[in-house]
Amino acid sequence: NLDREMHRPTFHFTPPANWMNDPNGMVYYAGEYHLFYQYHPDSTVWGPMHWGHAVSDDMLNWQHLPVALYPDELGTIFSGSVVVDWNNTSGLGSKDNPPMVALFTYHDVKGEQAGTLDFQTQGLAYSLDKGRTWTKYNQNPVMKNPGLKDYRDPKVSWYAPQQKWIMALAQGDHIGFHSSKNLIDWQEESTFGEKIGAHGGVWECPDLLEMTIASTGETKHVLLVSLVPGAPNGGSGTQYFVGDFDGSKFIVDPDFSERLAQQEALWLDYGTDNYAGVTFSDVPDADGRTLFMGWMSNWLYARDVPTKKWRGSMTLPRNLVLQETALGLQLFSKPVSELDNISQRVAEHNNVEVNSTTDLSTLLGQIEEAHRLKVTVKRQEASTLTFNYKNQSEQLSIRLDASAGTVTIDRAKSGATKFEAHFANPQVGVISPSLDAYSFDIIYDKASIELFVNNGELSMTALAFPSTPYSEITFSADGQALIEQISMDKIISQQVK
Ligand code: FRU
């Protein structure tokens, strides 16, 4: 069993011990969700990367498995993806037992230190036993480096119209799209992004998603691109582009380009702590969801956060939905419905009038260290609405400013903040201004807040390290407002197997 350090989340994924960053190789196969992750098994700070591994049947209860991929003479193992090769295009398995195929980046530290540029290449490994053991391909790397210092994080998907595999690869200030018939021989089709979007840092961890707009049934492609530094609230973050992919090129929608003339980028999550997230491969058609998880940290301070035996957790699994809004197509994030299975309603009220400050704790009873708070507020006279999560001496606040169309999370007094200079800075997200009502879905797990406003129009993820869990929540409005609905769920701690 895991040690129970005070800031270790109760239902978010954390490694058994030591350092973790990006989720890798997320795939659903034979009734199991697989999560691999950037792992340094010997230390609580980043170092020679391995792929840690866990499986789950609901993305919430995880079973730890042995390390899946170890460094070898070609390098350490950076981020990448796993697909099920159903038609055995690689020839590495059979149609009866399709191979699970991992494409990952080899990072050759010696080459890097020697000042070469070609130290990142792509390797392949496969498993014929549901991911329990992995064999590296005997002619790795399958992709050599053309002379690009940053050449990593292959995310592979099947492009059915042309019966071929497509790989999105981070190539410094752009994404490369590569294609293959067999997952082994790759050719570059096109590049995207040199002149569009946010470029405050290097592009990493792309993911090309095929998505259907719920209201019209139309199919679009969305490209996720992580960026470090250059996120709207500092450090690392994930932007996205909406467009079409024709098997070779990704073309951004003209409407979307126009929006990018008004703002630098659209962000998947405006909080500071959702990075390098990608989606699960091979989610069954009958399910049809776009399932996403990110690393719940930020390269600004990931190595400094005050945990002792382990460092790093994943965000909740989320369902990404492409939705039409007044401003155009936008990517909404919603907690997966599986969360309901580990939630227990402890309080529920309707029509609560709010004047200045209302102590929600008197309404909701004991505030659990892992909970979900859902609130729908009719703004009436008020223009700012504020939640304060408190213990005796610390507080984390979430403030919606309806006239400005912003939500600010302020963790300046949230607990331990001094381990890194930026951690105490307020973080600001963007939401539709001046609506009559706003809904908030706040998921708290000891050391993190995941906030979803208006059913995922805005999501913000932020770590916090209070000295004791917040045990009181207040809500205030700067004028008359009405809480139409409020509920509190206790989330049952997941005992990791
Ligand atoms: C993103 C990243 C990836 C890289 C990995 C190394 O956080 O920098 O680009 O593959 O982490 O651990």
Image (spheres, helix red, strand yellow):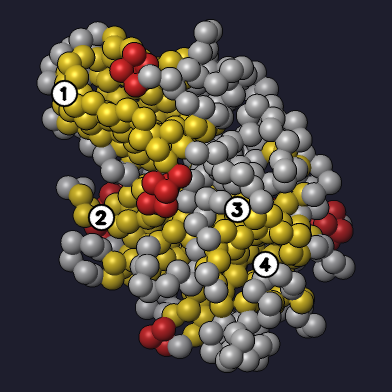
Q: Is the CB of mark 4 within 8 Å of ligand 1?
A: no
Task: Answer yes or no: is residue 43 visible.
Answer: yes
| Secondary structure under the numbered disc 3 in the rendered image | strand
Of badges 3 and 4, the one in the foreground is 3
Q: CA gap, disc 3 to disc 1?
A: 39 Å
Residue under the point 46% across and 37% down: 491
Find residue 363 and report its image quarter.
top left
Q: CA distance from mark 4 to mark 1?
A: 52 Å
Q: Which residue is mark 1?
A: 351
Please give the name of the residue rendered at 25% of the width and 63% of the height, measured from the top-left corner: 213
The circle on residue 323 is: 2
For mark 4, what is the residue? 104
- How many numbered discs sit on the rendered protein? 4
Q: Nearer the viewer, mark 2 or mark 1?
A: 1
Q: Nearer the viewer, mark 3 or mark 2?
A: 3
Of residues 253 and 347, the one drawn nearer to the viewer in this rendering: 347
Mark in front: 4 vs 1: 1
- At mark 4, the secondary structure is strand
Q: Position of residue 392 (x, y in %)?
A: 52, 8
| Distance Cα–Cα, label 3 vs label 4 | 23 Å
Q: Is residue 226 above or below residue 432?
A: below
Q: Disc 2 versus disc 1: distance between alpha carbons?
A: 29 Å
Disc number for residue 62: 3
For numbered disc 2, what is the local secondary structure?
strand
Type of amino acid under label 3? Trp
Task: Identify the disc placed on residue 217.
Answer: none
Type of the residue with mark 4: Phe
In the picture, the quarter occupied by the N terminus is top right
Towards the viewer: 251 or 95: 95
In the displayed structure, does residue 163 sit left or right of residue 483?
Answer: right
Q: Position of residue 442 (x, y in %)?
A: 39, 33
